[in-house]
Every structure is written in C-alpha cells, then in structure tokens.
Image (cartoon, rainbow, N blue to C red):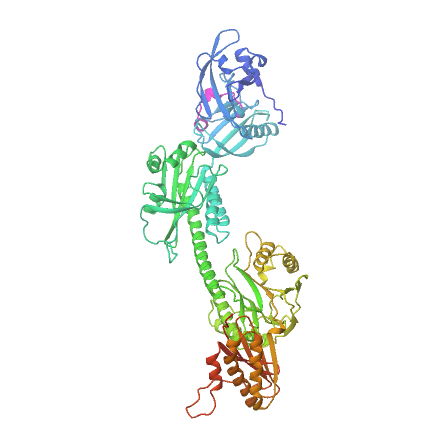
Amino acid sequence: MSPVYPFDEAATARAVLDGDGTVTEWSEGARRLLGWTAEEVVGRPAAELIQGPPPAARSPRWNGTVTLRHRDGHTVTVWLLVHHRQPKNGGTGDWLAVTPLEGDRPPQPDDPLEQAGLTQSPCAVAIYDERLRLHRINDAMAEVIGLPEERIRGLRVPELSGRLDGERIEQQLHRVLTTGRGNDVRAYVPIGVHGRVNAWLARMAPITDATGRARGVCVAAHDFTEQYESRERLQLVNEASVRIGTTLDITRTAQELADVCVPALADFVSVDLLDPPEPTGEPATGPVTAPVTLRRAAHQSINPGSPEAVMKPGQLDVYPATSPQADSLLAGRTIVAAVPSGDLTQWLTWDKARMERVREYGIHSTMAVPIRARGATLGVAVLTRFRRPDPFTPDDELLAEEITARAAVCIDNARRYSRERETAIALQRSLLPQSLPRTAALDAASRYLPAARAGVGGDWFDVIPLSGMRVAMVVGDVVGRGIQASATMGRLRTAVRTLADIDLAPDELLTHLDDMVVRLSAEAGGDSSTAAVGATCLYAVYDPVSRRCTLARAGHPPPVMQPAGGRPRQIELPAGPPLGLGGLPFESAEIELPEGTVLTLYTDGLIQSRERDVDAGHALLCDALAAPSGSLDETCDRILHTLLPTGGASDDVALLLARTQGLPASRVATWDIPADPALVAPIRKQVVGQLDLWGLPDASFTAELVVSELVTNAIRYGTHPIRLRLIHDTATLICEVSDTSHTAPHLRRAKTWDEGGRGLLLVAQLTQRWGSRHTGDGKTIWAEIGPLEA
C-alpha cells in the first residue's frame, strides 16, 4: 500500500477515463471545479461533460483549452493536461486528465519558496511546496517539461508526468520534506511530447524558513542521457563479446547476433549469409555484384514467433540492387533508411510482401550492416525499428557495426571450423571401410558417428579376413582431433591390415603397432604444431573351425559378448598400456565363442559422457544388447539411440557388432602325414575322395596338384609331425599343411636346368592366394582354391 501524504486533493481537478472514454475516477477537485459529484459522473461518457466535440489526443500527452459543462448549467473554460497511461500487465491503458485549481494564487512576499533564485540557472529547477505541489519552475525546467509554468503550477508529480514512476519520485520528495535531508534519484523516463527516454539525476533538497522548518523541496534535474547511453552501449558490446560465439556453429552464432541486438538496439533483426562457392568453400574477397543470393541464417523479434519475417531460416532469396541487403553489400558500408525520408519506401518497391510487413507493423527505420571478416564478405545484418519511436542515430550505427564486426569474426571462425571438420570427416570416412567383407566366420554390422560439437577424432574399425577362414576384428581410437588425427588413424589402420596379413598373434601385432606409434610421436616432436601421437586399440581373431577367439587390447575398453539366448557380459582381458608408451608388454587371452554369440567392440565415446559414469554407460549398453532385435543393424541403431544424447555425442563413436558362425565338422578333413615321400600318392587319393564326398569333383585336379606340392615340401624341408587339413566353404577350398619347423618358405624363380624350385610357383599359379603363418609350435602353409562352382 502506498504511504499517505498530506495532500490537498481539492487543489487539482483529476479525472480518469478508460479506453472508451468512460469516466472511471473523479476527484474532489473535479467536483469543486464543475459541481458534479463522483457518484453522478463515474460510469458516464466524458463527452457529455464537454461543450462541443472532444479533443483528439494523438500522442501519449496532450494539453489544451477545453470548454466544460458545469452542473448548474453554465460552461467553464479550463486548461487540461492529458496523459495516456500504460498498465503494467499490458492492455490499452487509460487516460489521466488534470488541471490545477490554485495555480494563479498570488505569492506571499515573505514566502521562502519565492526567495529561491531560479530564473537565471542553466540547471532545470522545480520547487514544490509543503503539499508537494509544483510552486515554481525556471525556464530550463519548462523547456524540459515542454509546458509553461503558469499552466502546470499546482500539479503533483504523478499528475505532471502521468507515469507510474511519478509516485516513486513523489515518495522521495515526501522523505526529503519530512526528514529535512537531501536525496538523489535517478530516473529513466520519456520527457516532452516526443517520448524519447532520457536519463535524469534529480537532486532534491529541502527549502527551510527562518526557523529551520522545511517549507518545500527544491529539485534540480541533470540530464546525463549521453553518459547513460554510452554506458549502455559499452555494456551491450561487452554482452555481445560474451554471448556471441559460444559455439563453432554458423547458424547458432548468427542467432546469437540477432538475440543480442533485440531489443537493445532494434525491434527486429535478420541475418542473411552468402553461400560459399564450390569447391573451395571460401567466401568472396572481391566486390559483391547484384543481384545477391543470400540464405537466411537467423532472425529475432520482440514479437514471439517473429511474425515480421518474410523468410524462414535456411531459405534462399535473391536481392536486387535496390534492396537494403544488396545496397549495403554493394556499397561495402552501413546504410540507414527511414520512412520519412522516403529511402525505405524506395528500397522496398521490389518486394510487395516486405512492403506489406512495413505497413502492417509500422516499420519506420532500417539499418543494413555488412558482415565482413578477414577481408571476406560473409553476409549482411538488417536491423529495423517499429515499436521504438526514435530512428537510428549515428551512435546506433557505430554500435551495430561494432557488434557485427565481433560476430563476423565468430561466424568466420565457425565457417573455417565447419570446413575443416567436413574435410576431416570426409577424410576419415574415406579411410574407414566402405562396407564390411562377407565371411563364413561371422556376420558383422558397424556404425561411425563423428562428435557433434568437438573436432573429428581418430576412431576406426575394421574386419579383416585371414587365412584358414579366420577373421580379425579391430577397433581403435587415436588421441587428438582434426585432420591430423584422421590421417594418423589412416596410417594405423593400414599398418594393422599389413600386420594382420602376415598372421601375427594379437599381442605381437599390438607390439609392432606400439613401435610404429612411438616412431610417429618422434616424428611429430620436431613440429611444434603437432602433438605427440597416442592411441588405443583392441584386436581380436576368431576361428570358426575351433570356435575360439584370441583377443588383446592396448588401453582400450574391453568388448562385450552375448551368447545366443544369454545375458550380455564384459569380457575380462588384460588391460595393456595405450599405444605410444613403448617397451611395455601386451597380453592376449583366448576364449570360446559358441555359434551365434554377438561380440561388441566400441570406442569410449559410446559409454562415456558428462551425464553418467562408465559403469552406467556399460549397463545401458548391456540392456540395449539384451533387447530382442531382428538384425545386427537394428541392434546398432538401438544402441546409439539408447546411449547417445539427442544432440549427438561429445566424442567420436565407433561401434562394431559381430555374430559368430561355426563351421560344421563335416566341412573339415584332417590327415597326419607320414615321413615317407612314397606315401604322398595315397594322400592325394584320400583328398580326391573327400572332394567327391563334398561334391567338388571339378576342384579335384587342382587340389591334387596343390596338396602334392605342399605335402612333398613339408616332408622334404619341414619337421615332423606333419598334418594336412582341408576346409570347405560354400565358395572356397582351403588346403593347409602344418609342421613344427619355423622356417618359412619363399617363392623363387627356378633356372632352366634346375630340378627343383617350381613347386610354390605352381601353387601360386593354380590358387586364388597362398601364404604362411607362424603358430605356437611351428608354421602352416595354406592355399585357397576358388571360387568354386555351386
């Protein structure tokens, strides 16, 4: 509740009218002036009290002389001051009409209020009596208020201003009057008929008589609008530096520019950007030519939903030379236009839809600011005003240019980052397998997702067919971001394929890979712009014949296995150090994987996040794997949907799922080979018989020759025991000869008169591919014959 002051309500005639002109309040002073009581007037149209047509108030404040009807029938001509008051909660508001009744009372000679010197003061000064009614103002204050002293003498501050903050100022006047101590009050109010908001410092001091009793209050108003606006501009620039460029996303940065400018600088702001030309992706550095094609990146308005916008974000539009956007870009500078000057109307003749928006919302000023950074033109920001009555000033122009320049650098940084990120993604995707090979050992599916906001990392995966129908699975993660990490990933993936091709055991392969990462780090050490290389890796080899899998990891998350119809669980493996430390051993483990087991390999970006710990992520992964699904692709999608946030992961994610398949024993035949070369012929016959059982008579001739050469070489150069194994796939026949010698064979070209040296050359000519691999107790020479006809 407002405090009670010793006001003489009969000293001012006050009336309040609603938007329809109906009287809602009627003061005692109004009854004193016209004789009508409040009960007789409230609820009636105010026009009934006016002699002749009522005045038309076209501004928030109106003053003039009006002839009113007295209750006894005669007319009274009075001067009225009328304010339009805006309510706090919106709506049309009401009208306050006041006139002083004692403004022409002659001053008393000994009145201390009259002894205060006012006229010559350059400072705006007003004196209020002990009833807190205006007693005197000087010429400077009259100029500020826009009304002469003789018209407003006797009014209170709320009656004089017509604003709600007038009551707050009056409370301060009352405090000065009752305490006898001065006070300073800052006010930001529209002054005068134009409604421009000025910043004022009102210094209040009591006026005392000879006895020291306060008889009134002197108010000296100092206009510090310029300092206030300078501080506001500085604050807006500082706010722009904090709010613009929070991400490396072009659209988000453009939206931040629009958000900062509304409503502090404009009522509606649009940001339109040039599409970079292909294939370089670099914006134009030369002059822009008309017409200009721009894409709407963002816009913002004081009205919810931005109804003033003609374009939607993401849409392209072509702007002719007569448009604000093109005119500013062609001139290379900020251009301001307004309706009173006719420039804005001339600008918008090219677009009827925009012209209708201007008329509908009362847009009166437009400012187009080019967005340029590092010598390149990126786009244009257009600021418009329709609710704020004042046009853009030169200070507004400088402020808009300062904010836009800061945003331009952020937009250019985001553009450069996006281009590098797209290049890194393209490079990484080109280095990753485009499709997974089809093997008899397993059915596989994969997914790769780059980080949503961070730079592209070096995650990779691969499925590598090995000899003996075995298959290798690998998942790795290179430390770092960007093109460098993608390039390093490509080198490591190539190295893994090369090492896998010579059939190294998983722990040995990681040892060689670790040596390579150490060398890469040493090479990078000479370049201060490149950080040391580091990586993690998981390598697994599955054998469909034995249904066993050998795994080793280098600082990588362990895989998860789900037996057919069972619950997913994590495979316990020796952790191993990350690649690049050098000199530390790696250990492998061998486990049995029954047919139909799903093996899940992944990088840490899948289970790690800021919202949960690794254990919670692992539990979600197991739940997603346990849910029934029709295919591995569906399982991949469900895992990503379950574990990754809607906006994307904060780190790269590589996921590889593999469902194991076993080879039936009926498709494998094994013989122990005696040491007598004379017994090779019976072995060939047994091989031919086995091929007849498998329904492969067409492969008998080639298989017989290959078996003969490999077995003969093993007897002649190898160490017993010797074993022959045939493996039959749907499209391939594999011949393997194993012995306990670690000496690897090599292909050589025999001379014309040499009696030997042609066996492996013959094998190479007759088979699809051949090779050797070392085992724990010797070596195995293998050859693949195929493709076989169905």
Q: Is residue 378 magenta?
A: no
- Rendered position, 465 above or below 170: below
Range shown magenta: 143-157
Q: Is residue 154 magenta?
A: yes
* Image quadrant where one finds the N terminus: top right
- Rendered position, 280 above or below 586: above
Q: Is residue 63 left or right of residue 627?
A: left
User: Can you tell which quarter of the image residue 595 is in?
Assistant: bottom right
Where residue 313 appears, as percent x and y from the top left, is: 45, 45
The answer to whether any part of residue 582 appears in the image is: no
Front residue of 227 and 575: 575
Where residue 766 appears, as percent x and y from the top left, is: 47, 79
Q: Is residue 38 left or right of residue 264?
A: right
The answer to whether any part of residue 569 appears in the image is: yes
Give the tally of numbered discs.
Answer: 0
Front residue of 67 and 373: 373
Give the residue drawn at x 61%, y 69%: 662
